[in-house]
Image (spheres, helix red, strand yellow):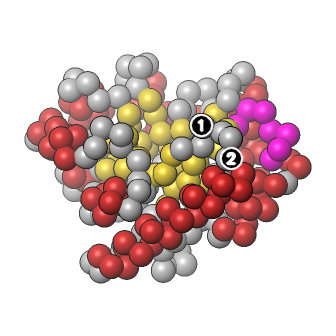
Amino acid sequence: MIKENLNHILKEIPASVTLVAVSKTKPTSDIMEAYDQGHRVFGENKVQELTGKFEELPKDIEWHLIGHLQRNKVKYIAPFVSLIHAVDSLKLLKEINKQAAKNERVIDCLLQFHIAEEDTKFGLELKEAHALLISEEFLHMENVRVVGLMGMATFTDNQDQIRKEFKALKGYFELVKENHFKEDDYFNVLSMGMSGDYSIAIEEGSNMIRVGSKIFGERNYQH
Ligand SMILES: *Cc1c(COP(=O)(O)O)cnc(C)c1O
């Protein structure tokens, strides 16, 4: 099933959209099924689970951390993580920069924006992102690179609501690009869309979707 699900989604989405296969809570054998189809980009939302799977699985996998990241855990993923999706503070970015330097790496990050109605979801407002990006501290960081934005829509059946939120995130992306990364080609990632809403997300300009249950099946517990 994993193979069929994966191929179905890959056929459906434009080649310009990166599919992050979200394997959280799933066994490494499930990941290997997708891997054997040629898939290499996987996302996890827990540091401990991510490091365990990294150690066990082939080293050409590109691992993304998609969930909320605590500062004291950055050190565990800094040696190998490819992209950190949910950066929502300068303090966190500082720690990523520090740990990346220790590993002689530059770590790519996305700023997470708050677009959902629920105030339980993490993320920055435009003003906060702006403040972060013009801060002296950020401008002196040499071991992190902000390559785009990430966001999660409200968990709802209301398609108009979801579309409106994705439209807003795309608008923030354009503004941040224009104001802070105009000449920087690397700032080009817009991570939005999950199993239930990736089609709308792509219509609204997403070029990176994070899809779990539609590839690997329902999870036993919700993260
Ligand atoms: C779990 C998760 C996903 C994938 O969710 P599905 O609905 O299973 O596709 C995407 N993004 C984040 C941040 C997640 O935690």
Q: Is residue 101 above or below residue 93?
A: above
* Residue drawn at x 80%, y 47% as measured from the top left: 138
Res. 8 visible in picture: yes
* Residue drawn at x 45%, y 68% as measured from the top left: 167
Q: Nearer the viewer, residue 127 or 75?
A: 127
Which residue of the protein is positioned furthest toward the top in this rendering?
Answer: 59
* Residue drawn at x 22%, y 23% as measured from the top left: 36
| Amino acid, disc 1 | Tyr
Q: Is residue 196 above or below residue 59?
A: below
For disc 2, the neighbor class at 10 Å (few under 14, some 14 to 19, many from 20) is some
- Specify the quadrant that holds the N terminus: top left
| Amino acid, disc 2 | Phe
Indicate the position of residue 119 as horizontal and vertical percent values: 55, 78
Q: State how far apart marks 1 and 2 are (Cα).
A: 9 Å
Residue range in magenta is 138-144
Q: Which residue is mark 1?
A: 186
Indicate left or right for 184 with 20 as reference. right
Q: Are marks 1 and 2 in contact (CB under 8 Å)?
A: yes
Q: Is residue 49 above or below residue 135?
A: above
Dividing the picture into quadrants, the one containing residue 186 is: top right
Dividing the picture into quadrants, the one containing residue 107 is: top right
Q: Which residue is mark 2?
A: 181
Does the Cβ of the disc 2 residue fall within 8 Å of ligand 1? no
